[in-house]
Image (cartoon, rainbow, N blue to C red):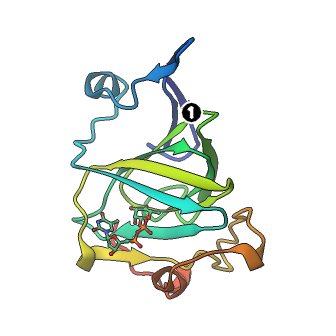
């Protein structure tokens, strides 16, 4: 597994080793011992996957502490732009966003520590998105930031008239009014 720093503390881009042969390929998407050796000690408690079509934006989501979630995210099919925003008040990168293309082809994963808002846009016709969380879903602790916040100015890579967004995500507050406690 290759590990790339991002300039954000504990936010890492990971590239699992792929073993390709005439049948296709094999990879270990998570190996607890290997992750712990690499300093990633999260105790993952929930696995999720979602399916989305081109133009979908999901985000930007997080759960308040003590229900906040670190996430190990990856794409099984298709291509996305994965986006995180650092909400850790004492972080030197507080309020900054980081974007990384994740795809079936590049095989990259993003290890997102607690204290980040997270979202993604779907750049291919369809996407299967898979992720592990180190804390359980908690509806009451769910919060969001509006995906097209003017201060964050995230370039999602989708023309405005093609964006597909849920009513819930459309209703999130701007970054300046967001509630967070990290
Ligand atoms: C996230 C989640 C949702 N749900 C339910 C709530 C709702 O009825 C339905 C769809 O939920 P959402 O619209 O929030 O799903 P979605 O927009 O895919 O939410 C996800 O987005 C990405 C960007 C993340 O970072 C994730 O942590 C998660 O927030 O699934 C659960 O039962 N468990 C969960 O863990």
The C terminus: image quadrant: bottom left
Image-based side of 57 in relation to 154, left or right = left
In the displayed structure, 34 sits above or below 142; it is above
Q: Is mark 1 within 8 Å of ligand 1?
A: no
Instruction: Using a 10 Å C-alpha cutoff, classify the residue at mark 1 as few (fewer than 14 neighbours), some (14 to 19) or many (20 or more).
Output: some
Q: Is residue 17 visible?
A: no
In the displayed structure, 69 sits above or below 108; it is below
**Could you tell me how many numbered marks the image carries?**
1
- Image position, residue 77 (x, y; %): 55, 44
Residue topped by disc 1: 107
What residue sits 22% from the left and 59% below the top?
Answer: 136
In the displayed structure, 33 sits above or below 159; it is above
Which quarter is ligand 1 in? bottom left
What residue sits 31% from the left and 26% below the top?
Answer: 31
Between 128 and 114, the one lying in front of the other is 128
What residue sits 31% from the left and 57% below the top?
Answer: 69
Image-based side of 136 in relation to 37, left or right = left
- Image position, residue 125 (x, y; %): 67, 56
Between 43 and 106, the one lying in front of the other is 106
- Image position, residue 114 (x, y; %): 35, 55
Q: Quadrant of residue 140?
A: bottom left
Q: Quadrant of residue 62?
A: bottom left
Between 56 and 147, the one lying in front of the other is 56
Q: Is residue 26 visible?
A: yes
- Image position, residue 154 (x, y; %): 68, 67
What residue sits 56% from the left and 52% below the top?
Answer: 127
Q: Quadrant of residue 142?
A: bottom left
In the rendered image, the residue lying farthest to the front is: 23
Q: Circle 1 — which element?
A: loop
């Amino acid at each position: 597994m290759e590990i790339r720093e991002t300039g954000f503390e504990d936010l890492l881009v990971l590239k699992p080793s792929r073993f390709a042969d005439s049948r296709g390929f094999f990879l270990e998407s998570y190996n607890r011992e290997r992750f712990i050796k690499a300093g990633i000690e999260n105790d993952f408690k929930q696995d999720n996957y979602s399916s989305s079509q081109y133009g979908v934006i999901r985000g930007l989501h997080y759960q308040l502490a003590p229900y906040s979630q670190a996430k190990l995210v990856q794409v099984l099919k298709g291509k996305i732009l994965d986006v995180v925003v650092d909400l850790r008040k004492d972080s030197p990168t507080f309020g900054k966003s980081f974007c990384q293309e994740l795809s079936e082809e590049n095989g990259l994963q993003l290890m997102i520590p607690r204290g980040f808002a997270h979202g993604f846009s779907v750049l291919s016709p369809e996407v299967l998105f898979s992720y592990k969380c180190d804390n359980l879903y908690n509806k009451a602790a769910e919060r969001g930031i509006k995906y097209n916040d003017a201060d964050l100015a995230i370039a999602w890579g989708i023309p405005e008239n093609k964006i597909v967004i849920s009513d819930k995500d459309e209703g999130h507050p701007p970054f300046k009014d967001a509630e967070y406690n990290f």
